Image: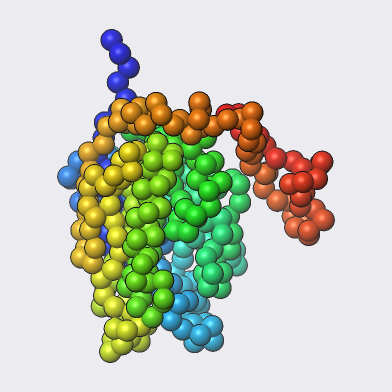
Amino acid sequence: MADRPPRTRVAAVHAASVFLDKEASTAKACDLIIEAAREGARVIAFPETFIPGYPYWVWTHTPPAGAPLFREYFLNSVEVPGPAVDALGAASREAGAYVVMGVSEREAGTLYNTLLYFDDQGALIGRHRKLQPTQAERMVWGRGDSRDLIVLATPHGRLGGLICFEHTMDLARYALTTMGEQIHVAAWPAISAIPHDPVSRFFDSISEAAAKHHALAGQTFVVNVQPCVDEDTVDRLGFGDRPDMLRTGGGWSAVVGPHGQVIAGPTRDEETILHADIDLADIITMKQPCDSAGHYARPDVFFFGLRPPATKDCSPAAIPCSMHEDTQEQPIDL
């Protein structure tokens, strides 16, 4: 009898956070996990920093005006381990599902834009910190390192993910491809709800293009998940009468197959849980022409590796240059 790759149901939770409220956002997330599982989802993905919400003020406020909001954000960010992690683990266990949760993580005095991975027994099995906060986000979050590029073996397939504009980092995407990624969570904020931002009008097209390209180039399913913005968030940021600055709704969530085509969704603006039934055997169709980490990789032409995490000495002299003979990359066999 031939081998049979897994089939499973995935879910993208297109919903608004309870803005700047860790406990309430966690409780809402737990309810949504159970709701998604009732419809058969076994891999459930949430947007970027669902707990305690995305810091939209970095695109709408000056740094001094945003400082009080950062203070509140810091106090509502998630410590690992901690009560929020325990609650999410309990919900994952009750649901019998793997969960990928976007959080603002707090460690000592620094915040990180993080994806937390829970298995169906409620254990925290992985963490990805965004490698490079994008533009104004650098006023909020620190940077991840090479330890944060992970793909996890699950009964439903090999699971990985990236956050927002990390999808423009071709080497980060390729690292996950070399690890055999089969289900990819692409977590983003609802930038389309910020008309003030010039990127807003084509942000959904950016995330759609990124999801489709990674699906095809990596021969993987992509669960692209964004939030929407609710009235409470708009009011908390002082834009109740300024829809030109921040509006309700937004987001673009969809599931994309390994051929680069949307197989569920897209959904925008309204809260919903988007489900898709996926068959990992569909990946084989695209492995034949372009196995990007195998017969289509040309390791005789290209070299790819991951640097070890930086030591405590982060001075320029302590970081090896890629062109220097003492570079300490960790090569990945292709």
Q: Residue furthest top?
A: 1
Q: Please say if 281 is above or below 240.
A: above
Q: Is residue 150 above or below residue 300?
A: below
Residue at x 38% of width, y 43% of height: 215
Question: Residue 192, how many percent across, how many down?
Answer: 33, 70
* Left or right of residue 312, residue 4 in this image: left
Q: Position of residue 326 (x, y in %)?
A: 81, 41
Residue 139 visible in the displayed image: yes
Q: In this rendered view, identify the residue nearer to me: 107 or 104.
A: 104
Left or right: residue 301 compared with residue 14: right
Residue located farthest toward the left when viewing the structure as drawn = 39
Q: Quadrant of the N terminus?
A: top left
Q: Residue drawn at (17%, 45%), measured in percent from left and top?
A: 39
Using residue 82 as the reference point, say whether residue 283 is left or right of it.
Answer: left
Name the one closer to the observer, 142 or 62.
Answer: 62
Residue 121 in the image, given as x and y percentages of width and height: 35, 38
The residue that appears at 64% across and 33% down in the rendered structure is 301
Residue 117 is at least partly visible in this image: no
- Above or below, comparing residue 28 to residue 325 in the picture: below
Residue in the image at 33% along x and 63% along y: 204
Please state, as top left, top right, bottom left or bottom right, where the C terminus lies in the image.
top right
Location of residue 30 in the rendering, given as x and y in whole percent from the top left corner: 29, 55
Residue that extends furthest to the bottom in the rendered view of this protein: 241
**Residue closest to the eye, 22 or 68:** 68
